[in-house]
Amino acid sequence: MLQHDNAQPHVARICTQFLEAENIPVLAWPAYSPDMSLIEHVWDALDWHIRQ
């Protein structure tokens, strides 16, 4: 099973056709899902703290 972030290169017709031809299932993922990366929140908090 493959999971990608629905970025334009990942959902291009050629990529979609390749995944279908190779029988690779793709996990459904919303186009504008919230950021699930915890480190991004840490960087934001650190940036805010430094700027104070």
Image (tube, rainbow, N blue to C red):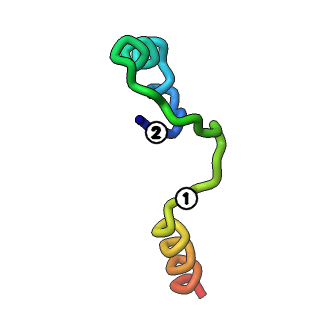
Is residue 3 placed above or below 8 in the rendered structure?
below
Looking at the rendered image, the disc whose residue lies closer to the viewer, 1 or 2, is 2
Residue at position x 37%, y 15% from top?
Answer: 18
Where is the C terminus found, in terms of image quarters?
bottom right
Identify the secondary structure beneath mark 1: loop
| 1 and 2 marks in contact (CB < 8 Å) | no
Residue 15 appears left or right of 31:
left
- Residue under label 1: 36
Tell me residue 36's x, y (percent): 55, 58
Tell me residue 37's x, y (percent): 50, 61
Residue at position x 58%, y 79% from top?
Answer: 48
Q: Nearer the viewer, residue 49 or 37?
A: 37
Q: Amino acid at mark 2?
A: Gln
Identify the secondary structure beneath mark 2: loop
Crowd tier of the residue under label 2, counting other residues whose Cα lies within 10 Å: few below 14, some 14–19, many 20 or above: few
Crowd tier of the residue under label 1, counting other residues whose Cα lies within 10 Å: few below 14, some 14–19, many 20 or above: few
The earlier-in-sequence mark between 1 and 2 is: 2
Tag count in the figure? 2
Where is the N terminus found, in terms of image quarters?
top left
- Residue under label 2: 3
